[in-house]
Image (cartoon, helix red, strand yellow):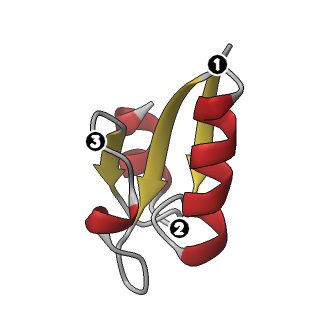
Amino acid sequence: MQVLVAGGAGYIGAHMVRALLAAGHQVSVLDNLATGHRAALPAGVALAQVDLLDSAAVAAAV
């Protein structure tokens, strides 16, 4: 299953990303990196750096 994690580069989100990957899902992440970090994500995970309050940017990213 393809899963989109909003805030996936933060502490909780990054753990969720790892759990989803371990369960065999394909994972993409939306995060503005205000408090999250790209380094928190496993290699190969698609990251769209967008602010979730910007609906046009979110629509373009998905």
* Residue identifier under label 1: 24
Residue 54: x, y in percent? 45, 61
Three-letter residue code for mark 2: Leu
Question: Which disc number belongs to residue 43?
Answer: 3
Three-letter residue code for mark 3: Ala
The disc, 2 or 1, on the residue closer to the chain's N-terminal end is 1
| Mark 2 in CB contact with mark 1 (< 8 angstroms) | no
| Mark 3 in CB contact with mark 1 (< 8 angstroms) | no
Q: Which of marks 3 and 2 is in front?
A: 3
| Mark 3 in CB contact with mark 2 (< 8 angstroms) | no
The disc, 3 or 1, on the residue closer to the chain's N-terminal end is 1
Q: Residue furthest top?
A: 1
What is the distance, in whole Å, between disc 3 and disc 1 at their CAs? 15 Å
Mark 1 burial class by Cα count in 10 Å: few <14, some 14-19, many 20+:
few
* Residue at image location 64% in from the left, 18% down from the top: 24
State which quarter of the image contains the N terminus: top right
The disc, 3 or 2, on the residue closer to the chain's N-terminal end is 3
Q: Is mark 1 on a helix, strand or loop?
A: loop
Question: Which disc number belongs to residue 53?
Answer: 2
Q: How many labels does the image show?
A: 3
What is the distance, in whole Å, between disc 2 and disc 1 at their CAs? 30 Å
State which quarter of the image contains the C terminus: top left
Three-letter residue code for mark 1: Gly
Residue 30: x, y in percent? 46, 51
22, above or below 26, in the image: below
* Residue at image location 58% in from the left, 32% down from the top: 21
Q: Is mark 2 on a helix, strand or loop?
A: loop
